[in-house]
């Protein structure tokens, strides 16, 4: 199987030096070839290929290698939300990203702590890594914020969703 991923040139240079991710790919028997800003990946295992692709994508979206490597665990997922789905206006995208980040990162931090997820705002994307159920709660929170919902209302809803997700997660363990 073969997959390709195009990432920002500066991230390609960093990726080449990132031994943790390269070793993880090697351990999963995924070969990586880098040509310019195109990352080519080959493997006989479709699932291993998708894991490595998600790890590289996460890294290119600003996650630290140790956070990106959480995707090696089947319980974790990566969600990438595109700002173009909310508005085409660059100015409005900047405003909306500011809503998600908050003053000095307060909203992003609060959202991350509540949902036990890592969030990154990079370029035209907002990315989330977390345990599957919790990442979905974080995604709904970001969606509500991007749609302009009141901050405290969003956090009340998320608090209830996290209680439900936590109960369901306990049942599934």
Image (spheres, grey):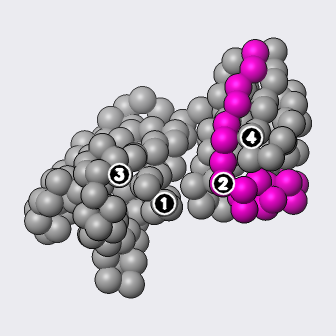
Residue 116 x/y as whole percent: 43, 57
Left or right: where 159 falls relative to 109:
left
Q: Residue at x 81, y 15 (%)?
A: 44
> Sequence-wise, which precedes: disc 2 or disc 4?
2
Q: Is residue 150 above or below residue 171?
A: below
Residue position marked by numbered label 3 in the rendering: 83
Q: CA distance from mark 2 to mark 4?
A: 9 Å
Q: CB of mark 4 within 8 Å of CB of mark 3?
A: no
Residue position marked by numbered label 4 in the rendering: 38
Residue position marked by numbered label 1 in the rendering: 123
Depth check: give the residue in front, 155 or 3. Answer: 3
> Sequence-wise, which precedes: disc 3 or disc 2?
2
Residue 103 x/y as whole percent: 32, 83
Task: For residue 42, say whether it is visible.
Answer: yes
- Residue 2 inside the magenta-drawn segment: yes
Residue position marked by numbered label 2 in the rendering: 8
Q: CA distance from mark 2 to mark 1?
A: 10 Å
The picture quadrant where one finds residue 142 is bottom left
Q: Is residue 3 above or below residue 62?
A: above
Neighbour tally class for label 3: few under 14, some 14-19, many 20 plus, Cα within 10 Å: many
Depth check: give the residue in front, 87 or 148. Answer: 87
Q: Is residue 173 above or below residue 150?
A: above
> Sequence-wise, which precedes: disc 1 or disc 3?
3
The disc at residue 169 is none
Q: Is residue 111 above or below residue 68?
A: below
Q: Residue at x 37, y 56 (%)?
A: 115
Q: Residue at x 67, y 22 (%)?
A: 47
> Sequence-wise, which precedes: disc 4 or disc 3?
4
Magenta-highlighted residues: 1-20
């Amino acid at each position: 199987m073969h997959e390709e991923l195009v990432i920002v040139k500066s991230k390609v240079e960093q990726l080449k030096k990132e031994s943790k991710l390269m070793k993880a790919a090697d351990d999963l028997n995924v070969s990586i070839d880098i040509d310019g800003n195109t990352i080519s990946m080959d493997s006989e295992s479709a699932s291993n290929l998708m894991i490595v692709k998600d790890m590289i994508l996460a890294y290119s979206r600003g996650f630290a290698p140790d956070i990106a490597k959480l995707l090696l665990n089947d319980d974790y997922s990566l969600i990438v939300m595109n700002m173009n789905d909310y508005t085409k206006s660059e100015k409005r995208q900047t405003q909306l990203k500011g809503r998600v980040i908050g003053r000095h990162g307060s909203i992003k931090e609060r959202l991350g702590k509540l949902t036990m997820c890592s969030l990154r705002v990079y370029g035209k994307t907002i990315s989330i890594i977390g345990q599957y159920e919790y990442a979905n709660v974080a995604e709904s929170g970001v969606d509500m914020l991007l749609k302009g919902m009141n901050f405290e209302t969003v956090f009340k809803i998320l608090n209830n969703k996290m209680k439900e997700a936590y109960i369901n997660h306990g049942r599934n363990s």
